[in-house]
Amino acid sequence: QVQLVESGGGLVQPGGSLRLSCAASGSISNIRAMGWYRQAPGKQRELVATINNNGYRNYDDSVKGRFTISRDNAKNTVYLQMNGLKPEDTAVYYCTATKRYTSTTYWGQGTQVTVSS
């Protein structure tokens, strides 16, 4: 099992920034990728960004150029730097980790991001 704990969410004004963190613990070996998803009220959960063990990143088009995903392997932590936040970014943000071989994906508990003036 992998435990993922997100932090850094909160209330921010449009145009502002937040940095989300996700600390992984437990059986953290053989993780091939980590990422961030989000779910807004009344909408399906959607991919925000992923990063694999080679450092390759991908982003949803809605956040590309504004958000940056990164990893600190020494700290077993993945980050999401969010700049230029918009009201439509309001959602619960979930951290994920995907294992090699089994392709099992683990989910964090989520952290609320609210963008409002």
Image: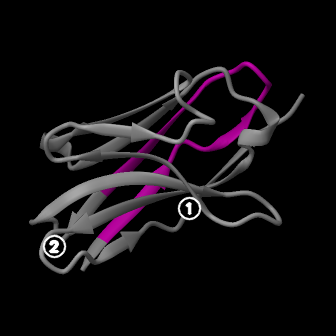
User: Which residue is found at the position 20% from the left and 37% from the top?
Assistant: 55
**What is the quadrant of residue 39 in the picture?**
bottom right
Vertical placement of 60 versus 110: above or below?
above
Q: 11 or 47, which lies in front?
A: 47
Circle 2 SS class: loop
Which residue does the numbered mark 1 point to in the structure image?
A: 110
Which residue does the numbered mark 2 point to in the structure image?
A: 27
Q: Quadrant of the C terminus?
A: top right
Q: 54 or 93, which lies in front?
A: 54
In the visual, does 66 lie left or right of 71? right
Circle 1 SS class: loop
Whether residue 19 is in magenta: the answer is yes
Whether residue 39 is in magenta: the answer is no
User: Which residue is found at the position 10% from the left and 65% from the top?
Assistant: 30
Q: Residues within 10 Å of mark 2 (few under 14, many from 20)?
A: few
Q: Residues within 10 Å of mark 1 (few under 14, many from 20)?
A: many
Q: Which residues are magenta?
A: 3-23
Give the main secondary structure of the magenta stretch.
Answer: strand
Q: Quadrant of the N terminus?
A: bottom left
Q: 48 or 5, which lies in front?
A: 48
